[in-house]
Image: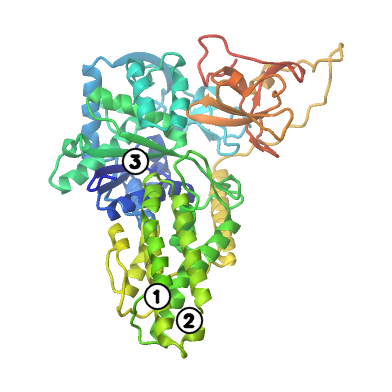
Amino acid sequence: MNQNRKILITCALPYANGYIHLGHLVEYLQADFWARFQEMRGNQCVYICADDTHGTPIMVKARELGITPEALIAKSYDEHTKDFADFQVKFSLYGSTNSVENKNLCEYFYHKMVEGGHTRKQLIQQLYCNHDKMFLPDRFVKGTCPKCGAKEQYGDSCDVCGSTYSPSDMKEVHCSLCGTTPVLKDSESIFFKLNDFKKYLEEWIPKHCSPEISKKMLEWFNEDLLDLDISRDEPYFGFAIPGTDNKKFFYVWVDAPMGYMSTTEQWAKKNNMSLKDVWDDPSREVYHFIGKDIARFHTIFWPAFLKSAGFRSPDQVFVHGHLMVNGEKMSKSKGTFIAARTYLNHLNPEYLRYYYSTKLNSSVDDIDLNLEEFVNRVNSELVGKITNLGSRGGQMLKKKMDGVMSTPDTEGANLIAHAQKKADTIAAHYEARDFAKALNEIRSLADDANKYFDEKAPWKTLDANPVETKQVITTTLNVFRLLAIYLKPVLPYYTEKVEKLLGEINYKWSDINTVLTNRPIADYEHLATRVEADKVKAMVEESRKINEEIQAAKKATSTAPKAAPAAAKTEDRNGDRPAEIEFADFEKVDLRIGQVIEAEEIKEADKLLRLKVDIGDGQVRQIIAGIKSAYKPEQLLGRKILVCVNLKPRKMKFGMSEGMVLAAGSGGSDLFVLAADDGAQVGQRVK
């Protein structure tokens, strides 16, 4: 492994309109482990992040609170940075997309897009309020949800049923400011011609993404790439597009990724460098850590933006999965959608850092925070195995003896040497972001040391043979020290206490080569205490109550619909078809064009396939379909199919099914999935 590398790593920018939760922390802790490991190896690792501060939701939330958008994002910045600091996430710089540097970059990129001929303008129809004389962004539109009938919902999503839709699909649409009915009016939008970079991206993606992500992303390349609308009409909290008289603003997905570069520029200025000195330094490695839900933006749009402006692209985009809690999606009603601050109100942040490290690897698989396992693993491994070595050895040496280490015995020297020889293996796992494998090695070494300590039973030989007893304790503390060094990327504050105990400072990876002998130790300070299950329950209960209060506040501003009486089941004269329905009834069914991006058979089931279907706007649904007898998984990959997306999700034995694939036939092998004709686009509604 080359030493003295220069590395720049970024994480996805958290939105300034919400709190940091445990799902977010999967990414920031993963990157923090890796950055701290690189620093221990002697590499220069710059770890940057920033708040994503622009867009209509910020503007609307500020209006509701009676404050300016700037005040809102300042409040979020304070909360986010405190949450990260308390979870021991060490950024080199944490910035904001609402900065001068970011504004200048957006304008520079746009200039390069225009100069290269990569933009075009087109008239599109948008809702316009004649009373307020302005186009209405989604959050300035209210109406009745087209899915569940809830009144006073915003123009992009329903707080009651969670559905997303276009404002034009709503009923009783009105301006949220004045209450008047808007009209459709032409507005000129600015588009980025993404297809200009299709060939470049086809070559770039496999070189800079994992095979798994590359395969998924390249499924978009079976046809021309659609242009991206990079403009939004006023009012909009963001940066105005040059040459539009402050009437057009950059779409948030334009200026958000710029935040990686603008924050890097701010760090560079503090270190007497320029952005190009850092970002375009050919000897510096650049890595993005992101979640799989935004992989498309970071592996297709962002590299194309960078190419258009003449900047280098990241060396790799590291994509991780989502967080599940107790095997299910995080749930606000169950209290498992847990804010970082709610966790911190009850539990030590190092416990979550440790637990995540035992789960995280370099794949895009989801990880599961099983709360019962969380308690057991922290108590049995971190406290019962690892900390136990330092506690028993340190307290015995200080309280029962003179507090000075001696030298290891022969068996102990071999045990220490064995632990030292694991350094390269553990380092390789850290480098590959396979933290779970690194922790397996560390736990194995702890098991060896505990076995040695228990077999030697120094508490029995203390009076009869103090010399050999001290050798056993010296061995145990040396192995414990090595474990602390190996754990430092995951548990930095914990390791600081170990350094204090043994009279050392700022462990580097190379300190593994040292063995401590004839050395006094400090008084033992408690390193970790057991997790109490009652505290975990209290955390979940607090989270549930907080989310109930939030939902109650939202419902107080809207009118929930009354349930419609169930229609009597009738059939036509032929007895084999349902009775006629009104067009309004048909409109309740949301049929969309979906594209199958993953398909696998459920081996335990005779009829079922598990599909992942892209339904547009970055949404991917898992659908469990009873078509196994008619189709093999590979026959469905990449196909555009018809999907009902507003069918109530159904929890099945093999997972949650979030929609229905449309098919014709009598069943079994006599089934034919309904496909879309050429020209139909993913996400389009079937009418």
Q: Which amino acid does label 3 sit on?
A: Thr
Residue denoted by label 2: 458
Nearest to N terminus: mark 3 or mark 2:
3
**Residue 69 to residue 135: above or below:** below
Q: Is mark 3 on a helix, strand or loop?
A: loop
What label sits on residue 53 in the rendered view?
3
In front of the other: 211 or 128: 211
Q: CA gap, disc 3 to disc 2?
A: 59 Å
Q: Residue 111 location in percent, x, y?
A: 21, 23
- Residue drawn 87% across and 15% down? 575
Other residues around mark 1 within 10 Å, as few (<14) / some (14–19) / many (≥20): some
Q: Residue 159 location in percent, x, y?
A: 55, 39
Other residues around mark 2 within 10 Å, as few (<14) / some (14–19) / many (≥20): many
Residue denoted by label 1: 409
In front of the other: 535 or 402: 402
Drawn side of residue 687 relative to residue 21, left or right = right
Which residue, as the protein is rendered here, is positioned at the far bottom? Answer: 463
- Residue drawn 39% across and 30% down? 297
Q: CA gap, disc 1 to disc 3?
A: 60 Å
Q: What residue type is labelled 1?
A: Asp
Of the 4 image quadrants, the one containing the N terminus is top left
